[in-house]
Amino acid sequence: MIRPRSRSLSSPVRSPGIDNEIVMMNSVYKERFPKATQHMEERLEKFIKDNAKLEDENASDAIIRFAHHQIQEMAKDCLQKSKDKLVTTNYFYEMTDSLEKLISDVSHDVCSFYS
């Protein structure tokens, strides 16, 4: 008779659930890259601060203001998730998809506006 494998022996990579992924990712980063999270957070804080305001020549363009606001919000969200230790692989995939969609939408809107 074959006994099912104990859950405690299961690899966290193969175990379902986002909690396992968060625990695994946080421990991997902490062990292998002790300064990576700190460096990422510092760069995000600098990006947010340096890009808090639009340059005057872009401030009147609604498409640029919208894109700027969206990117700032994504950066703030990423920073907060990192500080709360909630960064996951899926989060980065979702952020990448959101940024690609934003770029596509903005490019389309700009082309339509100036055509």
Image (spheres, rainbow, N blue to C red):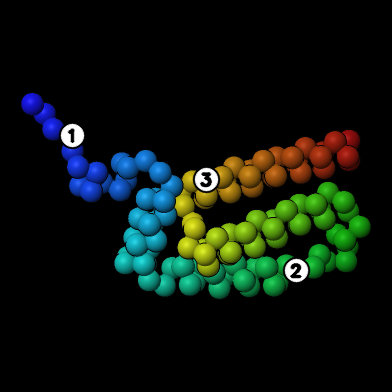
The residue wearing badge 1 is 4
Q: Would residue 68 appear left or right of 5 to someone viewing this image?
A: right
**Mark pair 3, 1: CA separation:** 33 Å
| SS category of the residue bearing label 1 | loop
Dot 2 alpha-carbon crowd within 10 angstroms: few under 14, some 14 to 19, many 20 or more:
few
Q: Would residue 46 appear left or right of 87 to someone viewing this image?
A: right
Name the disc covering residue 93, or none.
3
Residue 104 placement: quadrant? top right
9 in relation to 3, above or below: below
Residue 15 placement: quadrant? top left
Q: Quadrant of the C terminus?
A: top right
- Hey, what amino acid is under mark 2? Ala
Q: Quadrant of the N terminus?
A: top left
Please tell me which of labels 3 and 1 falls first in the chain: 1
| SS category of the residue bearing label 2 | loop
Name the disc covering residue 52, or none.
2
